[in-house]
Image: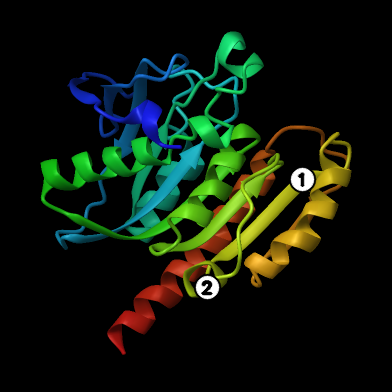
């Protein structure tokens, strides 16, 4: 399942990022839609080697020009909560999508690429990323759901905006502890599917909460992103308080 992303090589970072703090890099993969896979990240200010991270993945129309992290909402969240930020610009092309080889589909899924990118960042900066907060929209939300299924151990919370299908799974101790939020616009074509999906998903993720967005279509409104970041902030505070006990 993870074969298309094996054997990558890292490329040197490019200068850029309007904020001056966001680092842009890329890796080479064997996946036809992501031969050069770009990612941006922002380090937290704390000197502690143990870090929290927010990972964002966009939809299938994502390009490396979107600069997801370079927004007031994400940058303020990182500053106020002292967390790292990471976004990976997974893309699909029409050929891979038609033949079900896009990253959305489990046979071409790219969780190994994300794991290896995180390992590269940890090794380069001498840090240990201990707790993850994930957020994604559309195809990026499908990615987040699969990450919660296959690599749940370090995930505290995940927010999926208008996801599609994902892999089957059973409940486990690590999956059961994840605070999973699903949001979807009531005018989104996926809305009926997601309402049905939730009934199944709650058996795997008992902490799942569904948040419909009245009148919204297939997009991730800024208001919903801010709500997600606020909830994540509250959970980060609780995690840090529990570490002190």
Residue 133 against residue 221 in the figure, above or below: below
Give the quadrant of the C terminus.
bottom left
State the residue position of label 2: 177
Most foreground residue, 44 or 59: 59
N-terminal of the pair, mark 2 or mark 1, is: 2
Residue behind mark 1: 184
- Which residue shows up at 79% across the image and 48% down it? 194
Number of residues whose C-alpha sits closer than 10 Å to that of mark 1, classed few (under 14), some (14–19) or many (20 or more):
many
Q: Residue at x 80, y 62 (%)?
A: 199
Where 127 sits versus 223, above or below?
below
Structural distance between the alpha carbons of marks 2 and 1: 22 Å
Up-down relation of residue 25 to residue 93 (above or below): below
Residue 223 in the figure: left or right of residue 196: left
Where residue 120 appears, as percent x and y from the top left, is 20, 39
Mark 2 packing: few (<14 Cα in 10 Å), some, or many (20+)? some
Residue 188's quadrant in the figure? top right
Q: Is mark 1 on a helix, strand or loop?
A: strand
Of labels 2 and 1, the one closer to you: 2
């Amino acid at each position: 399942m993870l074969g298309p992303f094996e054997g990558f090589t890292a490329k040197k970072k490019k200068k850029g990022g309007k904020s001056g703090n966001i680092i842009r890099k890329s890796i080479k993969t064997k996946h036809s839609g992501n031969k050069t896979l770009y990612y941006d990240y922002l380090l937290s200010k704390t000197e502690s080697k143990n870090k929290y991270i927010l990972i964002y993945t966009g939809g299938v129309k994502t390009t490396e020009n979107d600069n997801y992290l370079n927004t007031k909402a994400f940058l303020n969240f990182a500053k106020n909560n002292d967390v790292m930020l990471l976004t990976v610009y997974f893309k699909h092309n029409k050929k891979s999508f038609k033949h079900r080889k896009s990253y959305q589909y489990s046979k071409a899924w790219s969780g190994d690429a994300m794991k290896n990118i995180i390992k590269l960042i940890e090794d380069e900066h001498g840090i240990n990323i201990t707790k993850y907060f994930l957020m994604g929209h559309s195809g990026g939300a499908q990615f987040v759901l699969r990450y919660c299924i296959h690599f749940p151990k370090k995930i505290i919370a995940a927010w999926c905006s208008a996801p599609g299908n994902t892999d089957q799974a059973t409940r486990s101790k690590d999956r059961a502890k994840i605070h999973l939020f699903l949001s979807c616009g009531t005018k989104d074509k996926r809305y009926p599917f997601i309402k049905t999906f939730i009934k199944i998903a709650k058996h795997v993720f008992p902490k799942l909460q569904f948040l419909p967005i009245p009148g919204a279509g297939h997009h991730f409104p800024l208001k919903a992103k801010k709500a997600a970041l606020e909830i994540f902030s509250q959970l980060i505070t609780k995690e840090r308080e529990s570490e002190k006990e």
